[in-house]
């Protein structure tokens, strides 16, 4: 079984230092591709910088020579940001070459038990005659929403799914390919998402693929207003349409930093996130 992993690297490159070590040493992963806009332009046409020190870190970290960096131009002023995102994601798939499983991750996504997920993909691969040739495997998104003084506000319970692995490498909307047969995994993928400082969030919402999909300034003001006293009063707050019941409520987790969270077991994190006042059994697939 040949597995390759790809990342889109942009202004949030620093988060790769959390994500990459969690998947790098797995022996089932043959190659890791990092794709970067060569003009250092976001999908909205704004400039970003990646310091030379980051590439030096990649070089020193890559002890098994698994990592390749590919650059091209992805911004087109005539296209909405999501079309430019799709262009970059499909470019990444193309550069991954032939393999049995194509995995795309964003820099701020962290596997707590990547080995178990690889074992699950191997079981599906060995039993692939049960399935169609075009598969997508979705995992559970554990979303972090805001870092506050007493810890992190997290989205509870975990009911959002995210496209991660596929045998059919093509994107139509972000990582979404709804023409594939979908297999739902219980594996948890921690998504740092909105849990960044204020300047980073402003950078995110003015440059990502969803820039034109909702009133981002209004939502940014909502995000800024949340604190340890009022977070419990908002419900059903996913910013995109047709996502009722996906982000039900916020909970406050008392951990100081991401490193602490990444030391949790997957089962412990699931228990913490899912101990919720609100219940839902609806299956939802992330478009963030």
Image: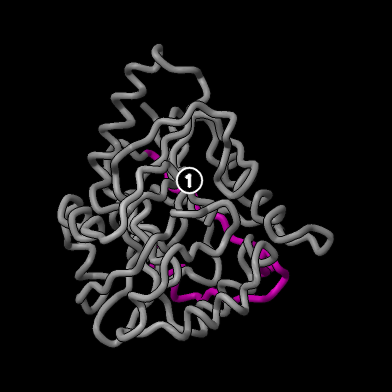
The answer to whether 49 is drawn above or below residue 42 in the figure is below
| Residue 15, image x, y percentages | 40, 68
In this figure, which residue is indicated by the disc labeled 1?
Answer: 285
Name the image quarter holding residue 178: top right
| Residue 5, image x, y percentages | 43, 44
Residue farthest right in this picture: 78
Residue at x-position 55% and y-position 79%: 220
100 with respect to 140 (left or right): right
Residue at x-position 63% and y-position 46%: 173
36 with respect to 103 (left or right): right
Q: The magenta stretch spans which residues?
A: 30-59
Residue at x-position 32% and y-position 60%: 156
Name the image quarter holding residue 281: top left
Is residue 261 inside the magenta stretch?
Answer: no
The answer to whether 223 is drawn above or below residue 163 in the figure is below
Foreground pick, 30 / 260:
260
Foreground pick, 46 / 243:
243
Q: Is residue 65 visible?
A: no
Is residue 46 inside the magenta stretch?
Answer: yes
Foreground pick, 139 / 22:
139
């Amino acid at each position: 079984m040949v597995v390759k992993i790809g990342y889109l690297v942009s202004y949030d490159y620093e988060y790769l230092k959390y994500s990459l070590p969690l998947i790098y040493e797995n022996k089932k992963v043959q190659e890791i591709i990092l794709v970067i806009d060569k003009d250092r332009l976001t999908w909205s046409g704004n400039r970003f910088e990646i310091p030379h020190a980051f590439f030096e870190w990649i070089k020193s970290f890559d002890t098994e020579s698994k990592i390749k960096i590919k650059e091209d131009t992805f911004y087109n002023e005539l296209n909405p940001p999501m079309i430019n995102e799709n262009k970059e994601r499909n470019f990444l798939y193309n550069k991954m070459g032939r393999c049995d499983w194509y995995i795309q991750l964003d820099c701020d996504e962290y596997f707590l038990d990547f080995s178990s997920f690889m074992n699950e993909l191997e079981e599906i691969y060995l039993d692939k005659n049960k399935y169609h040739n075009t598969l997508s495997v979705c995992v559970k998104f554990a979303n972090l929403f805001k870092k506050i003084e007493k810890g992190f506000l997290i989205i509870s319970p975990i009911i959002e799914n995210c496209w991660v692995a596929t045998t059919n490498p093509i994107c139509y909307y972000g990582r979404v390919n709804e023409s594939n047969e979908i297999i739902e995994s219980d594996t948890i993928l921690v998504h740092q998402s909105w849990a960044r400082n204020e300047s980073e969030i402003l950078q995110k919402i003015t440059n990502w693929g969803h820039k034109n999909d909702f009133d981002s300034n209004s939502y940014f003001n909502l995000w800024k207003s949340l604190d340890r006293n009022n977070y419990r009063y908002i419900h059903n707050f996913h910013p995109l349409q047709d996502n009722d019941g996906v982000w039900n409520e916020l909970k406050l987790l008392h951990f100081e930093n991401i490193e602490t969270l990444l030391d949790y077991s997957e089962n412990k994190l699931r228990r913490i996130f899912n101990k919720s006042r609100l219940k839902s059994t609806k299956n939802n697939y992330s478009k963030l």
